[in-house]
Image (spheres, grey):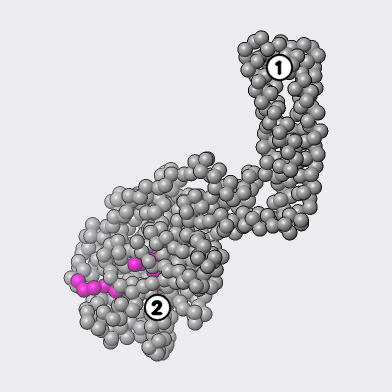
Amino acid sequence: MNNLIEVINDRCVGCSACVRVCPSPEANIVKITEDGRTVVEINNDKCIACGECIKACKTRARDYNDDTERFFKDLKDRKIMIIAHPAIKTAFPGTWQAVLKWFKQNGADSIYDGAYGADICTWAYIRAIEQGNAKNVVSQHCPAIVKYMELYHPDETRDLSPVHSPISCEAVYIRDYIKKNYAVAVLSPCPAMKLEFEATGHAEYNITFKRLKEYFRRKKIDFNKAVGSDLHYDFDDQVQGCMGGIFPAPGGLKYNLSINMPNITAISSDGAGVVYKELDTYAKLPPHRYPQVFEVLSCSGGCGCGCGVNDGDSDQTVIDVKNIMRDVEIDARNRRKTTMNGVDKQFKAFDDRVNPRSLMRNYDSGRKLAPELTVKDLEEVYAKLGKVTASDRKLDCGACGYDSCYDMAVAIYNGRNIPENCIMCAKHSSGSSPAAHADNSKASEIAEKVSSFATELLADIENIYASLYSIDKSNQQTASMSGIVEDILSKVVGFCSSTDSIDAENLPLLVSTLEKLQTAVGTLNANVKESAAGSSTIREAMQAVADATTELNVMTHDMVSTLNDKY
C-alpha cells in the first residue's frame, strides 16, 4: 500500500472533481462523515499517484508525500548519490546548475545526469527490438502508467517495455559499471516515481522539485540566475547525457528511436484525459494492429508539467516548458556524435561496456480483475437511485464524477460511492417534500388522468369477466388458462380500484399487467370452445384493453419525462 497522495479532510467539500479526473476507477471512496459532510477519501492500494486530483482540487484538499525532509535529515550522516531527472532544466530554468552545485557543497557524494540514463534506455530499446525481444512495446518511463497497467490491464503488462526507465538505467549503470553502491536520491518531477523505486529498489529517496523549492524558500536559499543559456554541467564521472535530455517531452522517446531507426513505427500520447482511454483501447486490439512502440506519458505536456514541479508562486506555463525543451533538443543535437557510417558513438560505447540484460525489468501481472456486475446486481443499485427507465440509466450527466451512470452503479455496489452522491437521486429525495410535490403540477395532473382512465377500464374488464362464464371449460388446458386470466383480471381490478396508488413509480407495473392480460386471453382464445357471442364480447373487450394499454404507455412516458424535466 502506498500513501503518496493524501486527503486533507477538513478542506474536502465532496465536489467529486478528484473522481472526475482520476484514471483509476477504484482509487476514490466517497463517504459521509459523522457530522454529515460528504468527503472523498483515497484507496491507496488502487491509487496510481498520477497527481491529477491535486491539479483538479480547488480547495487544496489533495496533496502528496515525498522523501525531501527525510533526505535532508539523512544527508548529514550518510553517503548519498543524486540522480537529476532531465526535467530539472524546466523546473529550475537558468538556475539548475547552481542547484546541483549547492547539493555537492552540502554533502551529496556525487551527482549524475538522468539524461545519460535515458540515452542508455534508448540504446537498450533499440537492441531489444533488433534482437526480437520487444516486438510490440508500451513505454514504461512513466510510473503512473506502469501502475495503471498492472492494476487494470495485467495481461498487457507483457507489452510493457522490458527495459528499465531512464532513472533506473542510470542507477544500474552507476552500481554495476561505475561500481558505486551508495544510497540513491532522485530529484524528480513526479510523486509516482516512488512506486518505481519501491518496485525495483534502485533508489531510496524521491525528492520532487516542488518540495525542493519549498525547502529552499523556507531556508531562504536563493540562486542567482545564470547568464546566458549554457546547458552544460560537470556531472560526476563525465556522464552528461545527450539526446536523452528530451525524454521528459511528449514524443521524446519516439524522437530518440526515430533518429536511430528511421523506419520504426512509433506513436506517442500524453495527458491523463487521453492516454488512459487509449491504453484501454490498446488492450482490446488484436496484436497485429499494435504499433512497434507506443510511448505514453500521464501528464499533459510531459514530465515538465507534472504535479511535483511547481509551487504556487510559479507562473511557468506549458509554453515555457516547451521552449526550454526545444533549447535542450537543439543543444543535444549539436553535441551528438556519429561515426562515418552514421552510428551513434555513444551507443557504440554502450555496446562495448553495458550488458543489456542488466537493464531488464519484470512487472506485477498477478492481479485478477473483478467480474462484471450481474443484471440483478445492477437492478438493485438502480432501484436505490430511483432510475426506473432506460433513459434514467443513460442520463450520464457526470455530476457524480463518473463518465456514466453504469460506472456510478458499479462504484456504489462496490462500496466506493453512495446513492446520495447521484444528483438525480438526491433531487428526487428532496422532491419528496410537500413543497416540491405542490410545484409538480403537471405530474400530478397526469397521475389524476391515469386514475380517471383506470375507472373507465373497469367496464371493459367486467365484459371479459362475464364472457368467461360462457366458455366451455371441459378441456383441462382451457380451464387452466381461464383461471390464469381470472387471476390477472383480479389484479387489474384491485390496481384500478386503488386510485391513490397509481403514480410514476407503479404506472409501468399496470401497463405490464395489462400486457400480460392480452397475452393470456390470446392464448385462451386459441384453446376455448366458446359461444359465438362470448367470443365476440371478449374480442371487443380485449381491443379496448389493447387501446388502453397503448394510451397508458404514452402516459407513462409523459409522466417520467415530466419528472426528469423537473429534477
- Pointers 1 and 2 in contact (CB under 8 A)? no
Which numbered disc flags the more N-terminal residue, 1 or 2?
2
What amino acid is labelled 1 in the image?
A: Asn
Marks 1/2: CA–CA distance:
82 Å
Q: Which residue is mark 2?
A: 211
Identify the image quadrant of the C terminus. bottom right
Front-lying residue, 455 or 144: 455
Label 1, secondary structure: give it: helix
Which residue is depicted at the point 78% across and 50% down?
A: 442
Q: Is residue 560 something that shows in the picture?
A: yes
Q: Position of residue 153 (x, y in %)?
A: 40, 50
Residue stretch in magenta: 181-194
> Would residue 167 be counted in the magenta stretch?
no
On the picture, is 431 further left or further right than 378? right
Q: Is residue 212 above or below residue 257?
A: below
Q: Dot 1 corresponds to which residue?
A: 525
Depth check, front residue: 550 or 336? 550
Foreground label between 1 and 2: 1
Residue closer to the observer: 316 or 563: 563
Query: Is disc 2 placed on a helix, strand or loop?
Result: helix
**Which residue shows up at 70% across the image and 21% down it?**
521
Q: Position of residue 80 (x, y in %)?
A: 24, 77
Q: Residue at x 69, y 23 (%)?
A: 486
Residue visible at 64% across and 48% down in the picture = 392
Q: Position of residue 277 (x, y in %)?
A: 49, 54
